[in-house]
Image (cartoon, rainbow, N blue to C red):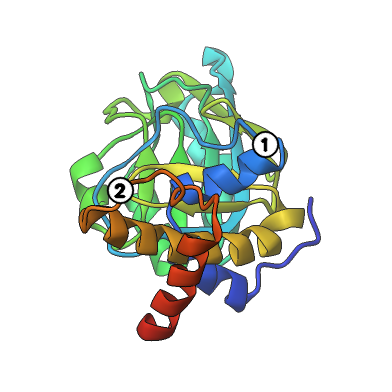
Amino acid sequence: MSNFVLSSETRNKLLGVATPTIATALFKRGLRNQFIQDVHPLSQKKANMVGQAFTLRYIPAREDLNTLEVFRNPEHPQRAAVERCPPGAILVMDSRKDARAASAGSILISRLQVRGVAGVVTDGGFRDSPEIAALDIPAYHHRPSAPTNLTLHQAIEINGPIGCGDVAVFPGDVLVGDNEGVIVIPAHIADEIADETVEMTAYEDFVTEEVLNGATIIGLYPATSDAPKIKFAEWRKQKGR
């Protein structure tokens, strides 16, 4: 597990950065597979989800070991993960991209919200999805799924490396989720990615204004001459950015 601790400064920067911008910054560093595939927000949120990964891994259920009786055990990995995921972290579940049975439901997600967890992500599905969508906590899944997790998923490990939507997620990695999806930033480069993408966002906002006012993208996006860079510097002064 990473020893990296997400600072409030880096968290605040990432709250205002879009996942496509982060994807480009990661691509520059050779990281091409960081956007979690086929995972969508249950509802639109005004602010990004930002936090470090706390993971839960499911394996295919074995029927003799995965009965309703397992929930009597307070150390059952699914229940324990909900109670141990740190405030400010994001619970990320490896459900093997199988949404035929739920990864969790509204009661567990409500508990995460009350405990101050920053978000929840699964590459499977949630049950009670209308209720989860109405919560304040950001939640991402593939699609709704009514059957209990026990039907197909056996919770087996907390806070080890997992795969979620074809992306490797290590405990402590930084996740950013917006209304488009979720991207994973390796912990050791989270600070520099935050710094770079804040600058990229400012330039992209400038470019958007220019394009909407009729400017060509040639030479502007990307900036391949000094003229747009000079104009951008003036724009930043005017905007206080």
185 on left or right of 101: right
Q: CA distance from mark 2 to mark 1?
A: 34 Å
Mark 1 surroundings: few (<14), some (14-19) or many (≥20) residues within 10 A: some
Tell me which residue sits at (45%, 69%) in the image: 232
* Residue 3 in view (yes/no): yes
Say which mark, if any, is on residue 31. Answer: 1
Tell me which residue sits at (50%, 53%) in the image: 176
Query: Which is nearer the eye, 108 or 94?
Result: 94
Select label 2 or label 1 by which is in front.
1
Tell me which residue sits at (63%, 44%) in the image: 26
171 on left or right of 231: right
33 on left or right of 50: right
* Residue 75 in view (yes/no): no
Say which mark, if any, is on residue 233. Answer: none
Where's residue 209, x and y in %? 28, 62
- Mark 2 touching mark 1, by CB under 8 A? no
Q: Is residue 127 above or below residue 52?
A: above
Tell me which corner region of the image, top left, top right, bottom left or bottom right, holds residue 5.
bottom right
Image quarter hosting the C terminus: bottom left
Q: Amino acid at mark 2?
A: Ser
Where's residue 192, x and y in %? 69, 62
Tell me which residue sits at (21%, 58%) in the image: 213
Query: Which is nearer the eye, 28 or 22?
Result: 28
Q: Amino acid at mark 1?
A: Leu
Mark 2 surroundings: few (<14), some (14-19) or many (≥20) residues within 10 A: some
Q: Earlier in the sequence, mark 2 or mark 1?
A: 1
Say which mark, if any, is on residue 106. Answer: 2
Mark 2, secondary structure of its residue: helix
